[in-house]
Amino acid sequence: MANFRPARLPWALEPEMPSIISHPAVPLALALGLGRQVVSERLLLAGVAASVVPDLDVVAFRLGIPYADDLGHRGFTHSLLFAAFVALAAACAFRALRTTFTRAFWFVLVATASHGILDSFTNGGLGVAFFWPWSGERYFAPIRVIEVSPLSIQRFISEGGARVLLSELIWVWAPCALLAALLLTVRKTRALGD
Ligand SMILES: [Zn+2]
């Protein structure tokens, strides 16, 4: 394979991202805010899975596919089109998810698309190929505030994992908690008005 570079492999096997535990913050916050009437437990589980599924692309490193390739890390699985496909698959399974087609589609779409959006706020790695297959260009958010996290536990511990977690607490979990609180307040106020 032309692009296979064994000397780079140990590094390449440890791509950077917001740590995998923080991506589910988005579906969790939405589910908490919207309530069980809107987001069933099964739909929430699907959303949590969908929020981490784009990072399955790290397998690309093992296959010798370079980071910057469309098939590489933060490539096609981080695109909006991929998110739409995952959402459509979930929507087709709406009965199993104990919800409606529309709810399954939108909830899983937001959960999957939020993954790439969060990645684009990190201060390391390459940008996100949001517009694959129309464009292979990699994008970052205008501000890159989230401390990037190494994937391997070993590097996570040795390279300031606490700093990464603190950064995610501030830039991912806190805004998500705020979103949940806001939705919850709107829901409760509406319920009182009825
Ligand atoms: Zn990612």
Image (cartoon, rainbow, N blue to C red):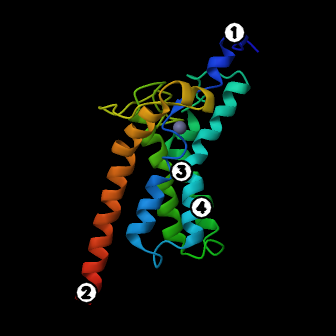
Q: Residues within 10 Å of mark 4 (few under 14, many from 20)?
A: many
Q: Earlier in the sequence, mark 3 or mark 4?
A: 4
For badge 4, the amino acid type reads Ala
- Mark 1: C-beta under 8 Å from nearest atom of ligand 1: no
Q: Residues within 10 Å of mark 2 (few under 14, many from 20)?
A: few
Q: Residue 109, position in %: x, y?
A: 49, 56
Q: Residue furthest top?
A: 7
Q: Residue at x 67, y 25 (%)?
A: 61
Task: Give the distance between the C-alpha atoms of the residues marked 3 and 4, in whole angstroms.
Answer: 9 Å
The answer to the question of whether label 2 and label 1 lie on touching residues, with beta carbons closer than 8 A, is no
Mark identifier at residue 46: 4
4 or 1: mark nearer the eye:
1
The answer to the question of whether label 3 and label 4 lie on touching residues, with beta carbons closer than 8 A, is no
For badge 1, the amino acid type reads Ala
Q: Earlier in the sequence, mark 4 or mark 1?
A: 1
Give the answer, above or below, for where 68 lies relative to 35: above
Between 10 and 101, the residue placed more toward the observer is: 10
Q: Classify mark 1: helix, strand or loop.
A: helix
Between 81 and 179, the residue placed more toward the observer is: 179
Q: Which residue is mark 1?
A: 7
Task: Give the distance between the C-alpha atoms of the residues marked 2 and 3, in whole angstroms.
Answer: 33 Å
Mark identifier at residue 79: none
Task: Give the distance between the C-alpha atoms of the residues marked 4 and 1, in whole angstroms.
Answer: 38 Å
For badge 2, the amino acid type reads Leu
Q: Residue at x 64, y 33 (%)?
A: 58
